[in-house]
Image: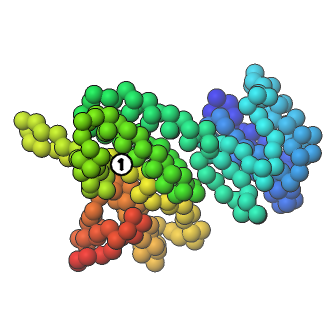
Amino acid sequence: MNMVLDGLETTINKQFPRWKNQKVNFVRYADDFIITAKDKDVIINQIIPIVKDFLKKRGLRLSDEKSKITNIDQGFDFLSQHIRKYKGKLLIKPSRKSVQAFKDKVKLIVRESHGLPAHALIRKLNPVIRGWSNYHKGICSKNTFRKLEVFIFGQLWKWATRQHGGKGHGWVFKRYFLGNHFSDKRVSGKGTYTYRLYKIGMVPIRYHVKIAQKANPYLAEFDSYFDKRVFLRKRLAFDCKQNTTFVYKGKNYSRVSPNKVGLISA
């Protein structure tokens, strides 16, 4: 399917060249795509016939169920994210369906983990939380992440109080939540291991920054520019791992806040 759609963008650009300023744009990821235009008539009367003809030649058809024509002010879902303009400003957030699917998955894992030790529950939840948050950390997700952290805390609190029905809430809090993370220790013949739940509310939001058009990695004058990009990429990886310190070029850095890193020694 990916290769079949190769050439669709070229076909559309030939009909609507950018130099004519017709404001027709094509965005594609695998077999999903968006086509934008200045008004609805252009989409219905010109673009859709082009797409249908392109697909027909390849033995395919445009699905009416999966296709949608909408105004950007009303918004639409694309690849589990909601794209919409608010008062002229384009904002992209996790879609409601994606958020609900994430909640349902967390609920299911917690429900199926009754009777298991906390470190086993943490090992089951962490890949789910980390994967979903990493997918959405490049858009306007901070408020969603904070709400989901409250939701996850509620699910874990129910699990913990049910696990220890004879204990008070104070004991349960000290046992699992005292260190600002849901955590647990596992003692084995190889030693003691501490497991800590990945906090979705601490995931940093980092929008993609395009490389400057004039930047050339083969010219010495841009060494500092690319070195800064490497540092920022490593710092993002550090923040996402939720560690406390990392080393870059012999310098130690420490977390100042969930979204900041400070130099502590050379």
Q: Position of residue 229 (x, y in %)?
A: 44, 67
Front in this rendered view, residue 25 or 221: 25
Q: Within the image, what quadrant is residue 108 found in?
A: top left
The residue shown at (44%, 36%) is 106
What is the number of callouts on the image? 1
Left or right: 91 as drawn, with respect to 108: right
Q: Within the image, what quadrant is residue 57 found in?
A: top right
Residue indicated by mark 1? 198
Q: Amino acid at mark 1?
A: Tyr
Front in this rendered view, residue 12 or 152: 152
The residue shown at (17%, 39%) is 186
Q: Within the image, what quadrant is residue 244 found in?
A: bottom left
Q: Position of residue 55 (x, y in %)?
A: 77, 29
* Element on which disc 1 rests: loop
Residue 210 seen from this side:
yes
The residue shown at (51%, 68%) is 216
The residue shown at (32%, 39%) is 161
Q: Position of residue 145 (x, y in %)?
A: 49, 52
Front in this rendered view, residue 15 or 67: 67
